[in-house]
Amino acid sequence: MNELTLKINELREIHRNDFRKFAHDCLVIRTKTQGIKPFILNQIQLDLLSRILRQIKLTGKARFIILKARQQGLSTFIEAF
């Protein structure tokens, strides 16, 4: 394998294990006022991510019922995850 292939595989592994970094490095969102920006998780999204990862670690799967609140970014987070 050449150096580029090794770097790509290394990044792929990092992104597979760190959704927060994957979202920032690979995903973009269109904001209402600032145009296209990297997808940086907000506090509510980080809390949900933590709960999802904890449940996956404990049970091997995650299942949540999320009551839809407006403007918190949970739909965007779920689609990205």
Image (cartoon, helix red, strand yellow):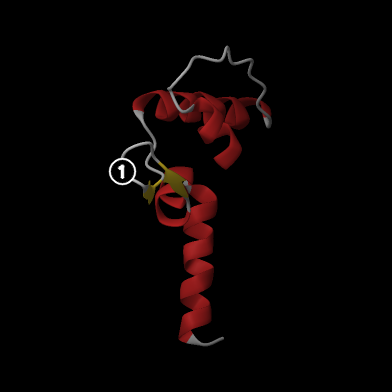
In the image, what residue occupies the spot 41% across and 30% down?
46
What residue does disc 1 label?
34
Residues 43 and 2: in front is 43
Circle 1 crowding by C-alpha within 10 Å: few under 14, some 14–19, many from 20: few
Residues 55 and 29: in front is 29
In the image, what residue occupies the spot 36% across and 31% down?
42
Q: Position of residue 35 (x, y in %)?
A: 36, 47
Placement of 36 over or under 77, stated as above or below: below
From the viewer's perspective, tell me whether residue 4 is left or right of residue 59: left
From the viewer's perspective, tell me whether residue 28 is left or right of residue 57: left
The quadrant in which the C terminus is found is top right
In the image, what residue occupies the spot 49% across and 30% down?
49
Q: Position of residue 25 (x, y in %)?
A: 41, 56
Amino acid under disc 1: Gln
The quadrant in which the N terminus is found is bottom right
Q: Quick check: can you spot residue 81?
A: no
Q: Position of residue 15 (x, y in %)?
A: 49, 54
Q: Position of residue 27 (x, y in %)?
A: 47, 51
Q: Quick check: can you spot residue 15?
A: yes
In the image, what residue occupies the spot 43% across and 22% down?
71
